[in-house]
Amino acid sequence: MTEDIETYVGKKIKDGVWGDDVEIEAISEIYARPIEIYATSARPIKTFHEDSSSREPIKLAYVGRCHYNSIKKMGE
C-alpha cells in the first residue's frame, strides 16, 4: 500500500521520528551538498549528490542497521 505525501510528511514531522535514505537524499538535493555515508571502513558505502564536489560533504556514520550519526574529523 502506498501512502500519499501528506500522510508521509505528517508522520515524519513528529518528534522522535527518524529520517532515512529518502530524507538524506532530499537534504542533499535541496542544499546542493554531497553526503557520504560510512559504516565499517574509511571509504563511504553510499554517496548522494557527488557532482557538488566544490562543497564539503556532510559525513554520516551508519550505525546499528537503522541509525545515522554525524561525524567529523578530530579537532574540528
Image (cartoon, rainbow, N blue to C red):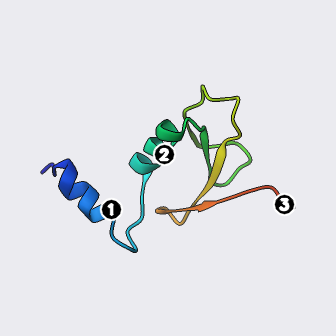
Q: Amino acid at mark 2?
A: Ile
The single residue placed furthest to the top in the displayed view is 51
Q: Measuring from the top left, give residue 50's x and y in whole percent.
A: 60, 30
**Residue at (84%, 60%) from the top-left corner?**
74
Mark positioned earlier in the residue sequence (1 or 3): 1
Disc 1 residue crowd, few under 14, some 14–19, many 20+, Cα 10 Å: some
Give residue 12's mark. Answer: 1
Mark 2–mark 1 Cα distance, whole angstroms, equals 14 Å
Report helix, strand or loop for mark 1.
Answer: helix
Disc 2 residue crowd, few under 14, some 14–19, many 20+, Cα 10 Å: some
Report helix, strand or loop for mark 2.
Answer: helix
**Residue at (70%, 29%) from the top-left corner?**
54
Which quadrant of the rendered structure holds the C terminus? bottom right
**Residue at (46%, 42%) from the top-left corner?**
25
Q: Amino acid at mark 3?
A: Met
Q: Which residue is the site of mark 3?
A: 74
The single residue placed furthest to the bottom in the displayed view is 16
Mark positioned earlier in the residue sequence (3 or 2): 2
The answer to which image quadrant residue 62 occupies is bottom right
With 56 as the anchor, is 25 left or right in this view?
A: left
Q: Measuring from the top left, give residue 71's x and y in whole percent.
A: 69, 58
Q: Which residue is the site of mark 2?
A: 27
Q: Nearer the viewer, mark 1 or mark 3?
A: 1
Q: Are marks 2 and 1 in contact (CB under 8 Å)?
A: no
